[in-house]
Image (cartoon, grey):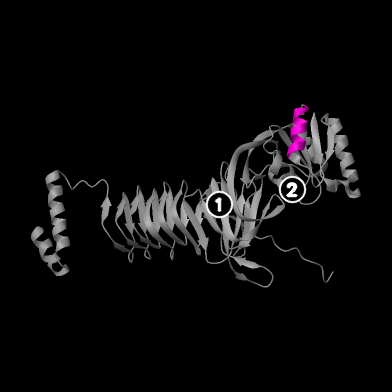
């Protein structure tokens, strides 16, 4: 009796990779030490933990985890970025940039959420803006933006003041 | 009338009583038929084609995963109904198809719950459950669009019907494959512990077509059969085979 074996408790079993996603809906997951090259497209959600170069396309959610890198233009339905992207990002609905996110490229989305600390270098375009009004205003804004670009940083403040 | 393809291992004395019970049950259900004993060099496709010509209504594979693989890997192109009577050890596929092991399978067979199943295909062979490539230095190209590589050796598992299970961080994970797609699970080797290799959490890629290549030959195991290859093309063959399945199937 002293050496009677006690049954080991069964190991808890979990559905992978994310809670909340139907277990039958397998996602595309790029692991941390995996490198993907080429036109990377998926019909479902994509989770990137490693490196992707080429292009990335999905109509659903793209998640770029902390430490992951994408060297490509990205198109997605929704996106949550905690890693880095060097390329243009076009999201048809919501883009979330976490505090560790770095984006070097133009952003096009409908809803943008940027956490303090996130870094963006590029132009941000959002659909549905109403204050742009008629074509005259658009021209004004266009010439104003080009002026800002052509001036050095010190001059920008003066230009903004006179423009306003 | 059904034709029963018995695996060679069923000649062993320990299976005699089980086979006797099964044969009696099949007679009771009115589905007893001709018995053919498979030899290691039997060409399953030729056998099945011959029986179809004779007007057989279905082919029943009797044995384990290896028998199932041996027959269906070649005979899946034959247009007939397939059944399975699992006996003995090594019967994972039966569990996936919801077929009980031993005499209980006769009742499932007699109910004739038919389903057309997707099969995986590689280098002229079909597979039902999984294809497994042991850790090797491989490069994988998906649907001729993108390429996946890793710095270290990678293990590759392609799932058709069998769920993919692995352990990590003290938990057991499971991914159930989707219908109409093959799923590839790639696990780079992180290192070796005392007795076994340590793997990274898997990368997952659903796909229609994939090419795996390597400079050195790698071991491929599909439905319990092993071979060595340097390049393989894996495809999904949709609704390839009509099969009698059980109510408790996993897909």
Residue B70 in sight from this viewpoint: yes
Query: Mark 2 or mark 1, which has the lower sequence index?
Result: 2
Residue A12 in sight from this viewpoint: no
Q: Quadrant of residue B226?
A: bottom right
Q: Total of numbered circles in the picture?
A: 2
In the image, residue A114 lies at what x, y percent? 33, 59
* Chain of the residue that carries numbered disc 2 in the rendered image: B
Residue B51 among those drawn in magenta: yes
3D distance between C-alphas at marks 2 and 1? 25 Å
Label 1: which residue? B211
Label 2: which residue? B65
- Label 2: few (<14), some (14–19) or many (≥20) C-alpha neighbours in 10 Å: many
Residue A128 shown left or right of residue B188 in the figure: left
Q: Quadrant of the N terminus of chain B?
A: top right
In the image, residue A150 lies at what x, y percent? 15, 62
User: What span is in magenta?
Assistant: B45-54
């Amino acid at each position: 009796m002293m050496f009677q074996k006690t049954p080991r408790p069964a190991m808890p079993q979990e559905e992978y990779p994310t809670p909340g996603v139907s277990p039958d809906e397998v996602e595309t997951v790029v692991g941390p030490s995996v490198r993907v090259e080429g036109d990377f497209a998926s019909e479902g959600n994509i989770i990137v933990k490693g490196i992707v170069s080429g292009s990335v396309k999905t109509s659903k959610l793209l998640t770029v985890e902390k430490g992951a890198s994408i060297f490509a233009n990205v198109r997605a339905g929704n996106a949550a970025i905690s890693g880095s992207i060097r390329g243009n990002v076009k999201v048809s609905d919501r883009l979330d940039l976490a505090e560790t996110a770095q984006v070097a490229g133009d952003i096009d989305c409908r809803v943008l959420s940027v956490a303090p600390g996130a870094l963006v270098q590029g132009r941000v375009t959002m659909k549905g803006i109403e204050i742009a009004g008629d074509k005259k205003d658009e021209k004004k804004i266009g010439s104003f933006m080009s002026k800002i670009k052509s001036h050095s940083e010190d001059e920008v403040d003066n230009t903004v003041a006179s423009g306003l | 009338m059904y034709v029963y393809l018995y695996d060679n291992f069923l000649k062993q004395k320990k299976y005699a009583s089980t086979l006797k019970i099964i044969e009696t049950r099949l007679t009771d259900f009115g589905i007893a038929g001709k018995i053919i004993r498979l030899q290691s060099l039997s060409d399953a496709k030729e056998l099945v084609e011959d029986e179809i010509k004779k007007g057989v209504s279905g082919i029943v594979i009797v044995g384990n995963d290896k028998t199932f693989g041996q027959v269906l890997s070649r005979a899946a192109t034959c247009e007939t109904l397939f059944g399975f009577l699992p006996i003995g050890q090594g019967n994972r596929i039966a569990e996936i198809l919801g077929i009980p092991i031993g005499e209980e399978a006769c009742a499932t067979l007699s109910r004739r719950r038919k389903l057309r199943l997707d099969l995986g295909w590689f280098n002229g062979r079909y597979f039902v459950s999984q294809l497994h490539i042991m850790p090797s230095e491989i490069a994988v190209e998906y649907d001729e669009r993108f390429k996946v590589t890793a710095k270290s050796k990678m293990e590759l598992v392609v799932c058709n019907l069998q769920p993919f299970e692995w352990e990590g961080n003290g938990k057991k994970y499971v991914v159930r494959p989707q219908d109409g797609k093959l799923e590839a699970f790639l696990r780079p080797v992180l290192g070796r512990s005392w007795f076994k290799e340590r793997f990274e959490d898997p990368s997952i890629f659903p796909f229609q077509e994939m090419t795996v290549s390597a400079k050195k030959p790698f071991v491929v195991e599909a439905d319990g059969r092993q071979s060595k290859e340097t390049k393989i093309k894996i495809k999904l063959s949709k609704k390839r085979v009509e099969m009698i399945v059980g109510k408790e199937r996993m897909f």
